[in-house]
Image (cartoon, coloured by chain):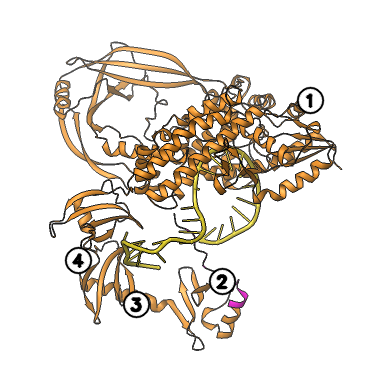
Amino acid sequence: MVKNLVIVESPAKAKTIEKFLGKDFVVKSSFGHIRDLDKKDFGIDIENNFQPNYIVSTDKKAVVKELKSLAKDAEMVWLASDEDREGEAIAWHLMETLELDPQKTKRIVFHEITKNAILEAINHPRQINKQVVDAQQARRILDRLVGFEVSPVLWKKVKPQLSAGRVQSVAVRLIVEREREIHQFESTSAYRVTGFFLVKDENGKFAELKAELNQRFDTRDKAKAFLDRCTSASFRVEDVTTKPAKRSPAPPFTTSTLQQEASRKLSFSVSQTMSVAQKLYEAGKITYMRTDSVNLSSLAIHTAKAKIVELFGEDYAKTRQYKTSSKGAQEAHEAIRPTYMDQENISGTKQEQRLYDLIWKRSIASQMSDALLEKTNITIQVSTAPEKFIASGEVIKFEGFLKVYLESTDDDDEQPNGESLLPPIQVNQLLDLNQIVAAQRFSQRPARYTEASLVKKLEEQGIGRPSTYAPIITTIQNRGYVVKEDRAGFEREFTTLTLHSGKIVEKVNLENYGYEKSKLFPTDIGMVVTDFLLKNFNPVMDYNFTANVEEQFDFIAEGKEEWSRMIGDFYKPFHQLVEQTLQISEKANGERILGIDPASGKQVSVKIGRFGPLAQIGETSDEEGADKPTFASLQSGMHIETITLDEALKLFKLPREVGEYESKKVTVAIGRFGPYIRHDNKFVSLEKSDDPYTIILSRAIELIEAKREKDSKAVIRVFDEDPDMKLLNGRWGPYLSYQKNNYKLPKNSQAESLTYADCQKIIEAGNSPKKATRKKKK
DNA sequence: CAGTGAGCGAGCTTCCGCTTGACTT
């Protein structure tokens, strides 16, 4: 019989709190929400003022049963879910589902898991705030209405299995629009002029002073003209200014900033960061990892200060409280920090250690002094021209927090400013010129999103919550709207003009640009769906839609608005859009007409087909005996929006018959795994140097023979007793193959000496081959 | 594993936010 039952959301939290509360308290966890809207008929009675129909999810039945029986016997039940909208709703659902007696139920909240905070909470219980619960219900119901009414429209008008939602559709929109900005971007170039001067230092040695001209030239001729004038110029120091400056540490981590920094500094994916953080949390090493708060408990701040003083001395400590600036933050938890701020290192996997190190450094640095800098600017006058060279340098006078941690930026080619120490220089000093370089530089197109920079953008717009950032990224990829990939860059020429020893030399150089690593790209289907939704469901696709409804939810929470009225006001015009779209909208397939096929005079077009994007020559026609169009799938890297007529026509040149070998046809085509030769129903991959459009028969035969040679080596033995039983050589060494299933050989067995009986035993001993549980692709 | 581009029209798909495991590769 328990005296007091405390229910929290997370089991790891339950364990910690139980220690603080002593033997009169049993602390259990609800594992998040215990009920949700039924999936049948929306789970909402739309006719009846949107009455929700909640059911206990199957995977929560056991939890609910246990909590119910514990609650029945308890003298007091303490609902201690988080203090935010979802937490309040969880408490209310518990109240309803466990049929708790209001006389024996109290609602408590705390924002940090410290003994004081918990005891304080117990001393200040309250009732469930039904208004906040209603705000959550409105949120839930609105999301269900949007998701479950718009998705079926997509099934009818675009493709089955697609999805739309308040959050995911806007996330995809961001990526689609960025991609189009990039395609429309026209790069311009300008000449950046850098002067390299020689200055004698105290020891009479020459040091180099690098200075950039305060103006760029938009043409080569103007840059050349400037260099011409410099050939006879003298260079005089006009001004030297030094100014103190300071830099402050970044606030402690929230979920989104942790994901960003782990991506930039450790190359973790967003979901990888979360699963490693989860491990650290469960091991008691860090505080809760799904939070939008930058707040630190006073205990944490004190421990941090003591550690900083111990490691670096008094001067380095400066305690600070940070304020959350992000839109819609609900601050139910602390920032993400080490549980014990004085614990510099932890045991664990390599990944856990690296992430912990990052969290420790960021948290500690947030309580350290500003870095003090001295910035110096030197202005250099050109005797023959009005333009001036500017040299700037930065010297760190006091490291402060920089001793521990510096936040990274998304800008990969950021100038490493700072560290450069300028040689001592006097005003009016004349400088010797070593050389001046005018280099053609191109303007940068907008950057594609990484997983983490998309999270940053979503958070800025107040879209999504800490617990959903990682799942959102996964969802839009799983639905096939977005792919994360690397793409090769391009080469381009750029010109440099160098003035050295009175002579100007012009050179054309090559540079790579536009190489992408782990970036998010929209797919064709992502673009078609986004356009369709923008056209037909514009209000929901608005970047401010979430912010606007959030404002309404706040009104509900404050009691200024009634939830079913708010939902009703939204639903009427929204549902109208759904009906209207179903009636009047054409099927959307992203069709684009590229031109006319010169060979047949027929129209060439691209669109999304049943199995993905395709190109077609000719049109489908209802007329009797009309020619059917011919089709070809687009290859990876080709996109409906950017493919050209020539590229599309080339697709129809394959499969190509190159001749006959052993009186069987030899054809060449490009498949899912690249270019291949097909002969006698066997497939042989082309090598990188082979071009499927031009390869000739003799080379094809060569490849076929090479493949045969390799295959013959692959078979170690086929048993006479049963030709299905084969010992084969695979990529990872010998293995046993039987009726399309593969089996590992026992360790230390000699494949050559195995008998038929041995092999039968291996098959029996091996786990019964799993049925081909085919995973859905996309 | 390497090609499909329709048809009888069954029965299914889908949202966001809270939480962990239970799964395979």
Q: Which residue is mark 1?
A: A123
Q: CA distance from mark 2 to mark 1?
A: 59 Å
Residue bearing the label numbered 2: A769
Q: Mark 4: which secondary structure?
A: loop
Q: Are marks 3 and 2 on the same chain?
A: yes
The chain letter for the residue carrying disc 2 is A
Distance between the Cα atoms at labels 1 and 4? 85 Å
Q: Where's residue A74, x and y in %?
A: 83, 39
Q: Secondary structure at mark 3?
A: helix
Tell me what residue is drawn at x 46 percent, y 80 percent.
Answer: A716
Amino acid type of the residue that numbered disc 4 sits on in the rendered structure: Gly
Q: Specify the farthest residue to the bottom.
A: A720
Give SS at disc 1: helix
Q: Residue at x 65, y 35 (%)?
A: A89
Where does label 4 land, which residue?
Answer: A625
Q: Nearer the viewer, mark 3 or mark 2?
A: 2
Identify the chain drawn in yellow.
B
At which x and y percent is residue A55? 64, 46
Earlier-in-chain disc, 4 versus 2: 4
Residue A693 lies within the magenta run: no
Task: Give the colour in which the image draws chain A.
Answer: orange
Q: Amino acid at mark 2?
A: Pro
The answer to whether dots 1 and 3 both sit on one chain is yes
In this picture, which residue range is highlighted in magenta?
A763-778
Mark 3 lies on residue:
A708
* Chain name for mark 3: A
Mark 3 and mark 4: Cα distance apart in space:
45 Å
Q: Are marks 1 and 3 in contact (CB under 8 Å)?
A: no
Viewport quadrant of the N terminus of chain A:
top right
